[in-house]
Image: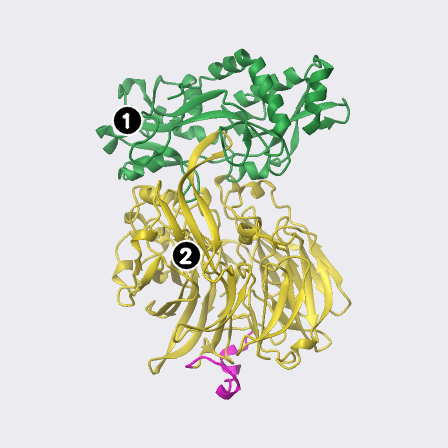
Amino acid sequence: MGTRDAGLSATKAGTAAGRVAEAHAEIAAGAVASPPGEWTTQGNNTALTRYSDLTEITTANAKNLKLAWTFSTGALRGHEGAPLVVNNTMYLVGPYPNIAYAIDLTKPATVKWMYRSNTDPWAVGVACCDVVIRGWTYDAGKLFYNLLDDRTVALDANTGKLLWETKLADVNDGVTMTMSPFVARGKVYVGNSGGEMGARGWLTALDENSGKIVWRAYSTGADSDVKIGPRFHPFYPKDRGKDLGISTWPPDGWKHGAGTVWGWISYDPALNLIYYGTSNPGPWNQDQRPGDNKWTSTIFARDADTGDAVWAYQVTPHDLWDYDGVNESILVDLPIQGRTRKVLVHFDRNAFGYTIDRETGEVLVAQPFANLNWSTGVDLKTGVPAVVPSKRTHQGATVQNICPPDIGGKDQQPAAFSPRTGLFYVPTNNECMDYTGVEVSYIAGTPYWGAAMQRHAGPGGNRGAFIAWDATTGKEVWSIPDKFIVYSGALATAGDVVFYGTIEGWFKAVDARTGQELWKFHCGSGVIGAPMSYKGPDGKQYVAVLTGVGGAAGVDSHVEGYPAEGGMLYVFSL
Amino acid sequence: MSSPCELGGRVTMALLLPALVLAATAVSRVHDAHAARPVLRVCADPNNLPFSNRAGGGYENRIAELIAHDLGDSLEYAWWPQRRAWVRNTITANKCDVAISVPEGFGALLTTRPYYRSTYVFVSRADRHYGITSLDDPRLKTLKIGLHFVGTDYDNPPPAHALGDRGIVRNVVSFSIYGNYSEPNPPAKLIDAVESGAVDVAVVWGPLAGYFAKNARVPLALTPVVPSTDARTGTVFTFPIAIGVRKTDPALRASLQRVLDRDEDGVQRIVQEFGIPVVGRD
């Protein structure tokens, strides 16, 4: 990991140049970014800003962007995550069968090495939602990624040789792993997927050099399992009490209660805390799991070394709609009511954009960033969202027009932050669902009852939008509607150009201050990957993105215009 | 571990049928390259008795054999474990053409007329003499109840919905319908729990309960859940079971229906042999 202090190097934007946040926000002081011109982690910064300080591509010249080179991953299905660039080498990894490539950037598209994992095909049948992985991460000469069959592997970045692999769970139990690992303090943090299969969620820290498990923190169960101890001080009374991971469930419900950890992790070195969210509760219907179902749909702050929970905030208590809390927490410092607060900004599936004091867990702002009608608002004094009774789901009942639907106002697709504008750039979903009573369903041998869920476009008829957001006020600054959900990640750059892609395959550059479209390119498949930027050996700025539609975007595969699959890297430059 | 989607386990059937039937059924069928005769491609779980397993020990295997024999087809399986999206990963993915037991009218597939109708049942040790038949039986508030769960919030077996609606949750013990797939017949763990006394009573899909009760170490008592439609929640406990094909395969459905009609006795013998509790139409 690099040592440059991104917070100190960030420059303030002039307010005359265009629209910026009302009160200026900075990348969390002390957060560690990739070395200049490189992109070594999914968020490019332990604050998960997805911000590049390269300046060659500007709002003035972005219209001249051209395709520089392409590369086929050889995989179909959903391509999430971003490629990495370290030492003039690009590293990319595709969905199952998880083939990894190192590409020498000093020669035209030359493969330096490739690594074929022997991922167990059994895992394909277990994965909930396509066979994605959300990229990988680099630190100190090693690459780390998770295989769908519950192994974390470390490769030598120079040779592609396997350094270690650690088995973390058994696919036979319904557990898979899809998240990108995250590295801090010599530890590789990984979590599990499989809430739909009755898994119990956890985050595990592995030793970076040996792969040995250092600690594991469960999302449900006794305080000792959740690593809740004397240091745990949640801000709100609703999150205080002994063994809430047991007592907020019916007996044994926590054993299969989900709260899986399949999203993103951020790290504040100054506080030495990591931040991540847990999935929705499972697998029972809501009537079978009365209670808050802690610690599902929860944001955790933990000591990076010991894993001890320092605070937790349950975002959606007793979730009824599949609102996972796994979306990223982006770390910034911004002035609120006259003083600078160390905050995390989190765009939840439940469609509220939260600005939370990352030292204490106090919610400072909670405003809708996408259309929602399940709640009338979050009480900042209690931290409790007020649920609209008519939008409660219940077996046998029909509930029309719940917004957002199960995939949320935003899913895992990561947002970006620019310290130049102080704004967040957020890919969002604008869909609602009709939940209709009961429908006969079937898996081999067993008939059962499920609910029929029909998703449809939300108000305006557009299924998604790419927006700019002011986290100080909790207000949208501009919005670009899209026919489909916007399911790609976002990239912000110091040239004030922001990049994102659409399901239809358009890769776009827009003005960070106004949202004005500057350039677009049509890719062969849809974009659900996360764009990144790097400086090539020739000194030029490049922007790269993985394309290949799939993942949860597949919920709209029936909509006209949904493209064919196909994994391809596209790289652009002036 | 072997691949879940591996094609294999071909069972050679005697070729004993009139050429006319072949002609009628060949339209939507894959042909066996070696034998130049149609192949009955069946989607099945390799580890899920009493339904099917790789060794051919399930009733679905037996019915598949009966059909292949009748049609003079060779029999191939596409194995896929009982998992969420089983249908999508097998028959919809065109890895196979026939699912031997799906609920009649199941939206994703075209179905034949049902060849049996079963019900969710209460299962308990016979020496307990419970005789529970209704979900409103007051004893269900205190007995330890074992239930299968399926998956997402909205998808669960009928007893989970109906008991949840009654507030019966604190005495419920959950068992994954998927279970641990490295063990034989993972859903059977729930029946094991009744036998061992880990739970007092389980509410289980009939074919599963009937088969394992027949082979249990201690005598088990099975009583159907009545009424068959829950008055409180509208949840239905009985399911007519039919053979499913893709919606684009009406000719195959017609062919399978003719076999079911022709050999009704043979099919019913298999249903009976596996101890499947059969209920009549309401």
Quarter of the C terminus of chain A within the rendering:
bottom right
Using the image, name the chain to which the residue with label 1 belongs. B
In percent of width and height, residue A479 lies at 50, 70
Is B265 included in the stretch rendered in magenta? no
Q: Amino acid at mark 1?
A: Ser
In percent of width and height, residue B153 lies at 40, 45
> Relative to B163, is A161 above or below?
below
Circle number at residue A403: 2
The segment highlighted magenta reads A1-23
Q: Is residue A201 visible?
A: no
> Relative to B252, is A137 above or below?
below
In percent of width and height, residue A275 lies at 43, 64
Find the distance from the CA under tag 1 to the CA under tag 2.
37 Å
Hue of chain B?
green
Circle number at residue B134: 1
Q: Amino acid at mark 2?
A: Cys
